[in-house]
Image (tube, helix red, strand yellow):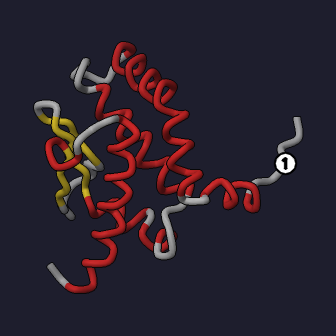
Amino acid sequence: MSHTRTAPLTRFINILKDLSGVFGIVPTKVIHLFYDDNTTCIAFNFNRSLFFNFKFYLGYHDNECITRPTVNAMTYWFMTFCHELAHNYVHDHNAKHEHYFSSFAEVYMPKFLDILKNHEAPNELLHKSKRVKY
């Protein structure tokens, strides 16, 4: 691996480790990284092991996470975790998968928000958010 990829890889690994903790997952047992330039696959679940494509972290989030993980990046990968964990129960993308996907997000949201607090990410939300008029 190129030395230019070492720091981004470490940042991505740390995000995935933090998120693994949210779900009570031992990362060394079921979390895997891969890099594939020739696919649109962001992540997948194979035999209850989760695989995350480093290519998408680099393209979508690394520039914003140089100092610390952002709310945007953490939320994206949290939801990706939820999606892939739902495949432990349902293989296809259907209403049942959607049920498990949203259930994971709902059940683990408090722990996820605790992780964001640990990264001081909520301050970022306050400074960047705009009031929405209804």
Residue at point 38%, 20% (across, down): 100
Depth order, front residue of 60/75: 75
Is residue 102 placed above or below 19 in the rendered structure? above
Depth order, front residue of 117/98: 117
Depth order, front residue of 82/58: 82
**Neighbour tally class for label 1: few under 14, some 14-19, many 20 plus, Cα within 10 Å:** few
Image coordinates of residue 18 in percent, x first then y, are 38, 51
Residue annotated with mark 1: 131
The part of the image, by quadrant, that contains residue 119 is bottom right
Residue at point 40%, 40% (across, down): 22
Amino acid type of the residue that numbered disc 1 sits on in the rendered structure? Arg
Image coordinates of residue 43 in percent, x first then y, are 26, 46
**Is 64 on the left-hand or right-hand side of 97?**
right
Is residue 4 placed above or below 60 in the rendered structure? below
List the single residue furthest toward the bottom: 3
Which element carries disc 1, helix, strand or loop?
A: loop
**Is 121 on the left-hand or right-hand side of 87?**
right
Image coordinates of residue 12 in percent, x first then y, are 33, 62
